[in-house]
Amino acid sequence: MTQLWNLGHIQPRTEIVMPGETISALFWNAAQARAPQVWMRQKELGIWRSWTWQQSADAVREIAGGLMSLGFAPGDTSSILANTVIEWVLADLAVLSCGGVSNGIYPTDAASQVHYLCEDSRTSVLFVEDDEQLDKALEVRDQLPGLRQIVVFDMDGLRELRDPGVISLDALRARGRDYNAAHPDELMRRVEACRPEDLAILVYTSGTTGKPKGAMHTHAGLVYTVRGYNTLIARDEHDEAMCFLPLCHIAERMGGEYFSLYTGSKLNFVENPETVPENVREIAPTVFTAVPRVWEKFYSGVMIALKESSALQQAVYGWAIGVGRQIADRVLAGQAVSTSLKAQFTLARWLALNNVRKMIGIHRARFLVTGAAPISPELVKWYLALGVPMLEVWGMTETCGAATGVPASRIKPGSIGPAASYNEVRIDPATGEILVRGPNVFKGYLNQPEKTAETITPDGWLHTGDVGVMEDDGYLRITDRMKDIIITAGGKNITPSELENELKFSPFITDAVVIGDRRPYLTVIIMIDQENVEKYAQDHDVPFSNYASLTRAPEVQALIQGVLDQVNTQFARVEQIKKFFLLDTQLSAEDEELTPTMKLKRKLVEKKYAAQIEAMYR
């Protein structure tokens, strides 16, 4: 396996890469040590623009100076309402350098959510990306007496705006230059005065079961965890990573921004969420972290392209991926790979698999990382068959990201690996719930001490809400969320995520919610993959006028029934899904049915589509 996947470059590293006991100290030490090196790149008007560590430090210094000129004091909170752009990182580091608290807001949030998050966090300065986000802020500004200033990254369309409460980022930086000239030592005094135990960031939960809760993370917890990440997966200054998940989510904040800050790996920002497939081919990251939805989309794209290829190309791919699967099976079983099979794999890569990897953009990737939601084991095996190890990690906002991880030396699809070296993990013997304890665990929910007490035990164990099993070798396997386990009318316990993952492995299904609690049989609500199902309809002369009519077409219904029939063969009769319903509305992150990380909200979906669910049980 080492020869095939070069695991020596994935092995954990424990040495300290960059000193500093706060995120702000880490940044300034890194900027000094790596000044001329490129840290970040972002595509603007079709051209990739590079930011060196020195340029980044200069910008952070000016933004921080501007904040201090506005009276931003240590302990004050600033929120950032923007897509994943370089300015997000610069503003975040400037706030932390001032000794402030940094909070992110999803760019898809409505004005009412912006109001709640700013009010709950006591935001005094709000950074917004553009005129669209500014409109939300202005709509609720009168209800936020503590909000002193709004700073806009991109002033396109706002040149004529004259509002004393709104300032451009360029103007803030200009104020910062003047402030720093008059107070040359103030910023570094703030950085040095910041203590590890100080509150650094707020990360609000997605609010699938109520209003979002602000998880509080200190500098000590962030630095401890980011150092721990390098004991899971090694990165260094030669690596290229892609930054595209929301930075207000713990995954990109820790695994992207802060881990890159610590290790020196380059951060490449995509143009927008829709250009991820195109940008990943341009960037060709050497390390690539994404959520299952992205990995499923890449797989679907390959399968659709394969159907359009010639019979010879299909045959070559079939043989090549078959060789890859043989090797993957042997590696996963801990068996030796013969010389002849290695030779076949070399040919398979040359004939087909390298082209598939280039089509996705993972041809330079040393490994792939998946997390934030369950993933089909078959999908992990497929990427492994391409010759790229996929490592699954598990964690949550409250554990500061990854708390367990599958090591490259022993991949087990369907498992989330053993506990990370920097925290403890155990199973509650009474409930089967996974519990986590360690310095990486958050300090509690802002303004909600009763919720904090419910979540963290007096001796420091975090209730994760996930139910799991720990195998004899210490590997953990998640069975489901505690609140999602289905008990049928016949008393059978069902873990819906297993069924849902198998359904989502189909290129025609984007998401699924299995129903059946206290009911005689299982049903499922399905969200189809618009692009792939539309392509299927066009190829098979299926008439449709819009998305809703597409979901109602008998041929599409038959297509999904075929997927369902295939999945059902893998489960016992009592676990099989009898009926399905296709959502006839296109959903985006702006819709209430989806979390900002594009997962269907189970309880809300069950409530909103109660009539359709009842119809499946008549």
Image: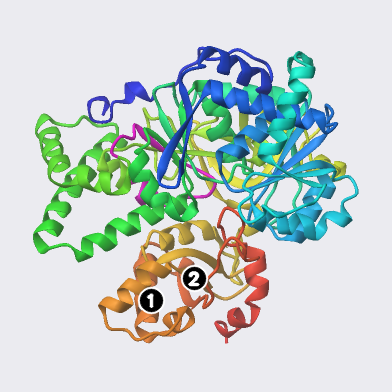
Relative horizontal placement of residue 92, taking residue 251 as reference (left or right): right
- Whether residue 364 appears in magenta in the rendering, the answer is yes
Mark 1, secondary structure of its residue: helix
Q: Residue visible at 74% across and 60% down?
A: 111
> Measured from the top left, where is residue 180 in percent x and y?
74, 21
Q: Amino acid at mark 2?
A: Ile
Relative horizontal placement of residue 555, taking residue 614 as reference (left or right): left
> Which residue position holds label 1?
561
Q: Which residue range is magenta in the image?
A: 363-381
Find out whether the residues at labels 1 and 2 contact each other: C-beta distance under 8 Å. no
Residue 470 in view? yes
492 vs 557: above or below: above
> Which residue position holds label 2?
526
Towards the viewer: 146 or 341: 146
For marks 1 and 2, give the one nearer the viewer.
Answer: 2
Mark toward the start of the polypeptide (1 vs 2): 2
Relative horizontal placement of residue 213, taking residue 400 as reference (left or right): right
Whole-Å distance between the Cαs marked 1 and 2? 11 Å
Mark 2, secondary structure of its residue: strand
Q: Residue visible at 49% across and 51% down?
A: 272
Q: Amino acid at mark 1?
A: Gln
Quarter holding the C terminus? bottom right
Q: Residue visible at 40% across and 27% down?
A: 239
Crowdedness of circle 2 by 10 Å Cα count: few (<14), some, many (20+)?
A: many
